[in-house]
Structures are given as C-alpha cells and as structure tokens.
Amino acid sequence: MKTFNKSFNKSFTQQEAIDEAGIAAAVKVMQSGRLHRYNREADELSETDLLEKEFAHSLGVDYALACASGGYALAVALRAVGVEKGDKVLCNAFTLSPVPGAIHSTGGTAVLVEMDDSLCIDLDDLERQAQQSNAGYLLLSHMRGHIVDMERVMAIAKAHQLTVIEDCAHTMGATWDSQPSGTFGDVACFSTQTYKHINSGEGGLLTTPHAEIMAKAIIYSGSYMFFQEHKAAPPLSAFEGLYELIPNCSGRMDNLRAAILRPQLATMNQRREDWNARYHTIEAQLQQNPHIHLPSRCDKEQFVGSSIQFRLPEFSREQLLQVVEQCQQHGVMLKWFGEEKPKGYTSQYTDWAYLGIERELSQTTHLLSTLLDIRIPLTFSLSDCKLIGEIISNIVREIHDG
Ligand SMILES: *Cc1c(COP(=O)(O)O)cnc(C)c1O
C-alpha cells in the first residue's frame, strides 16, 4: 500500500541559464569575430588569457591552461608529467570513464585502487598497490566531490615517489583544510562541462606550480609558436628545447567559452553556498531514515554539494531496483552504481574491458552495489530539495517495510 503521493516534476539535468554578464561577453566576442584564442589585437588580452589568469589567481597557483575538455586536460597532464606507453598509473576504481580513458590515450596502464565507504580512494589499498605495482603516478579523482585525507595521500605519494595528478572535475571551489582542492598534487585538472561547477558546454582547465610541466602542457595543447603569449605561463626560458620534442595534440579552448566562464568563476563562492544549502536540505531529510547511510565526511573537507550520494546497505538488488523505479515514478532520478549494465553517465570499472584489469576489486563492487546518487542542479529551490529528500526517504521506508 502506497501512502506517499507527492511528486517532483523538475528536470535533474537542467542547469541555470548563462548569466547576463556571460551572454554579453560572449556576444562581444562573436561581434569581434576573434573567437580563436590567439586571434587578438596587439594590446588586447583574449578572454582565454583572462580566464587562465583569473583561474590561477583563484587557486593561488602561478600557471593555468584552458583547454577543450576535462578529459583532454587529464590526458595532457599525464603526458606532461612524463607518462609513456606501458607506464603504470594508479587511479580510483570509482571514477568516471574519461579518467581511465585519459590514461589509456597516453599508452599508460591503469592500476585501479579500491574505494572505501566514505567513497574516497582506499588509502590502505593505495599503499599496497603502490608497493606492488611500483607505479610512478597517481591520478586521484575527487569523485563526486569527496575529498580524501590529503595529508595522508601526499605522505603516501612521497614515500612511493608518486607524481600526483588531481582530477578536480567535482571539486572546483572546494578546499581541504582551507587549501584549495587541486593545489596538493603536481598537476590538477578541472572540467567546465555542463554538469560541473561552471558551465561552458565543454571545456577544461589545468593548473600546476611547476614551470616545466606547464610549458609542456601548453605546447601539447596546440600553442603553435604562441606559447610565449600565454599570461598564466612560465617565462620563455621554460619552453627552451621543448618545442621540437612535444607534439601538438590540438585541444585549445576558444574565447567564446572563456567569455561565458569568467563571470561564473567570479561567483564561485556564492555558487558553493547555494549548492551546499541544497545539499544539506536533502541530507537533513535522508538522515531521518535509519536505512539510508550517508558517507562520512572529514571536518577538514569544505566540499561543493553539487550532487549527493547515499547507500542502502541492507537492501537486495531487487529492492534497490524498486527504489530507483518508484523514485522515478515520483519524478526523482536516482543513479544506481550497481546497475548490471552502464546507464547514462554511470559505469563501473568492470565496464572498461579495454583496461584489461584482472584483479577483482571486491570492496568497490560491494560498495557500488548499494550506492545511489542524485544531481543537485541550482535550478532546484530549497523546498524542491526538501521534497526530493522526503520522496526518497518515504519510498525507502515503504520498500523496506514491504
Ligand atoms: C566530467 C568528469 C571528467 C572529465 O570531464 P569532461 O570535461 O567531461 O571531459 C573527469 N573526471 C570526472 C570524475 C568527471 O566527472
């Protein structure tokens, strides 16, 4: 017997409109006709130059590079730190498919690491895998915005001499112990794809404090001989001798996207507050149901709640399927990471057969089998979020009680 009849009717994939400032800046770029980042007048800084400067400043790093996508930024980062064919790259088993895809594109071999019940990389398994694989690199995904103990991860990296690349697709605007996510490792990559924290349709940003890595990344991104014109870049001397050695793997950002992004970046702190108010509203509803397990989060983590995850550890697959279906009937779109077949954006490490992973990551498989996820677009109001939380909590209760 169903007792709960409220429904939700907004789209979980509807982001906010581009703000007026972004639209005006984009129109200006179109009117100029100078959409290519290197197509500028002598005394002009292009929108892409300005975005890079402002993004670097926002993180307190010297160097930033804007490029075509987050996944592209990851591939360039891996190449720029020296990953070559056959090199082993440690990486979260719980991540999104562009991450193993980027490793594969460099010829590197992914060594997957288990997740733990806080949805972060399992640091004990990381230590074990680092030891056993002798890998030189760690591509660390802050998947769904969950930030692992960065002190410990960097200590492990130091002990095993790992170069660390942070995948910050879900942590733009987040900090750990007051330090911006993306400033712990050697390189960080961000995405500006529509469902991330700033929206230009597609786009990526790469940051690093290392001059040589940035010089290489800029050349890889397709700078031709304009690398000396970058404004968030190392001095010319850093590029010396590199130009002939680094291929142009064309993947630049254009001025139109940069123009759309700059006003959004400028309001990141407000956006974080807006997301977190929504996150905590849903969380407060879910917390009232003892069958719903929310992952623990460290006090040092100041996250951006653009999505929320929870587990139903006591539920069978059949019950989980019922939860997903009934929530859908009430207008709430849950993603279930335990789905047999990949669906939408959701996939599991077992779906990436091309990686040739032989090890069974049973802990990750077990956790994913009861893990659910919802997006929280800023087009949802706080009362929308309360309703979403109520719907989920009630359906979970009804299905549990049979
Ligand atoms: C979206 C995403 C990426 C890649 O971003 P794109 O800009 O879509 O290529 C990388 N890692 C994670 C975890 C993501 O969610």
Image: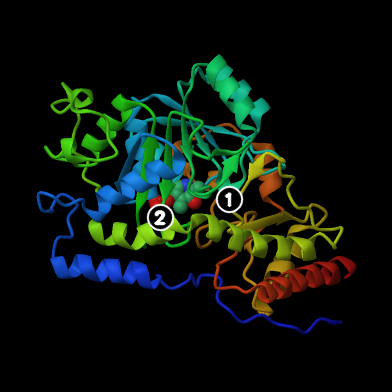
Q: Is residue 289 left or right of residue 124?
A: right
Mark with earlier residue (1, 2): 1
Q: Position of residue 275 (x, y in %)?
A: 60, 61
Task: Tell me if residue 358 comes above or below residue 280 in the rendering.
Answer: above
Disc 2 residue lies near ligand 1 with CB under 8 A: yes
**Along the line of sight, the residue nearer the viewer: 155 or 50:** 50
Figure quadrant of the N terminus:
bottom right
**Along the line of sight, the residue nearer the viewer: 167 or 398:** 167
Looking at the image, the residue that sits furthest to the right is 401
**Along the line of sight, the residue nearer the viewer: 221 or 180:** 180
Q: Is residue 39 left or right of residue 14?
A: left
Mark 1 vs mark 2, foreground winner is 2
Disc 1 residue lies near ligand 1 with CB under 8 A: yes
Q: Which residue is mark 1?
A: 144
Task: Tell me if residue 70 comes above or below residue 15 in the rendering.
Answer: above
Residue sitting at x 90%, y 68%: 401
Dot 1 amino acid type: Arg
Q: Position of residue 54 (x, y in %)?
A: 36, 47
Residue sitting at x 68%, y 71%: 385
Q: Residues within 10 Å of mark 2 (few under 14, many from 20)?
A: many
Q: Which residue is mark 2?
A: 192
CB within 8 Å, label 1 to label 2: no
Task: Tell me if residue 2 comes above or below residue 172 in the rendering.
Answer: below
Say which mark, if any, is on residue 305.
Answer: none
What kind of colouring is applied to the model shown?
Answer: rainbow
Task: Tell me if residue 241 comes above or below residue 143 in the rendering.
Answer: above
Regarding residue 252, the answer to whether it shows in the image is yes
Give the alpha-carbon distance from disc 1 to disc 2, as whole Å.
15 Å
Q: Is residue 142 left or right of residue 51?
A: right
